Image: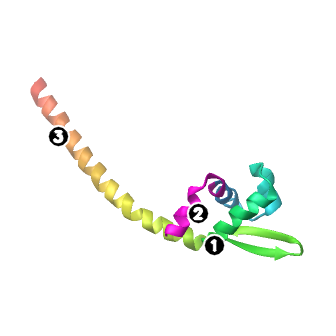
Amino acid sequence: MEKILSALAEPNRLHIIELLRDGPLTVGEIADQLRLRQPQVSKHLRVLSDAELVEVHPIANRRIYKLRPQPLKKLDAWLETFRNIWDERFNRLDDYLLELQGKEKKQGD
């Protein structure tokens, strides 16, 4: 999990993931869309590949990159544990606010 979060912490790598969400792209297409040089994009893709977030398919002299869903599912499952905690806290807050509203109505009567 640490490798995934570390890879996604860098803004350009996060943008690459967002671009690949729409489908596979070459290094050149990613570089053009992010307005970065190809060597920079290649370095970012290497980090994403090491974190197993992307996979590469070489076709002739081109490299096509696409997202790997498994690490993102793993990240989602990890985040789900935090969603449950926050849902509980928001439910308690809702109950407390409803209780306060009830007290205000009684005082206004």
Residue at 54 percent of width and 62 percent of height: 6
Q: Position of residue 67 (x, y in %)?
A: 66, 68
- Per the model, the C-alpha gap separating discs 2 and 3 is 44 Å
Q: Which amino acid, mark 1? A: Asp
| Residue sticking out furthest to the right | 60
Badge 3 crowding class, 10 Å Cα cut-off, few under 14, some 14 to 19, many 20 or more, is few
The answer to which of 11 and 102 lies nearer the viewer is: 11
The answer to which of 73 and 106 lies nearer the viewer is: 73
| Residue sticking out furthest to the top | 108
Q: Indicate which disc, 1 or 2, sits on the residue closer to the N terminus.
A: 2
Q: Quadrant of residue 42?
A: bottom right
Q: Position of residue 7 (x, y in %)?
A: 59, 63
Identify the residue position indicated by label 1 in the image: 50
Badge nearest the viewer, 3 or 1: 1
Q: Which amino acid, mark 3? A: Glu
Q: Which amino acid, mark 2? A: Ala
Residue 54 within the segment the image draws in magenta: no
Magenta segment, which residues? 1-14
Element at badge 1? helix
Is disc 1 in contact with disc 2, using a CB cutoff of under 8 Å?
Answer: yes
Identify the residue position indicated by label 3 in the image: 99
| Left or right of 9, for residue 42 | right
Residue 13 within the segment the image draws in magenta: yes
Q: Position of residue 83 (x, y in %)?
A: 38, 58
Image color mode: rainbow
Q: Indicate which disc, 3 or 1, sits on the residue closer to the N terminus.
A: 1
| Left or right of 14, for residue 102 | left
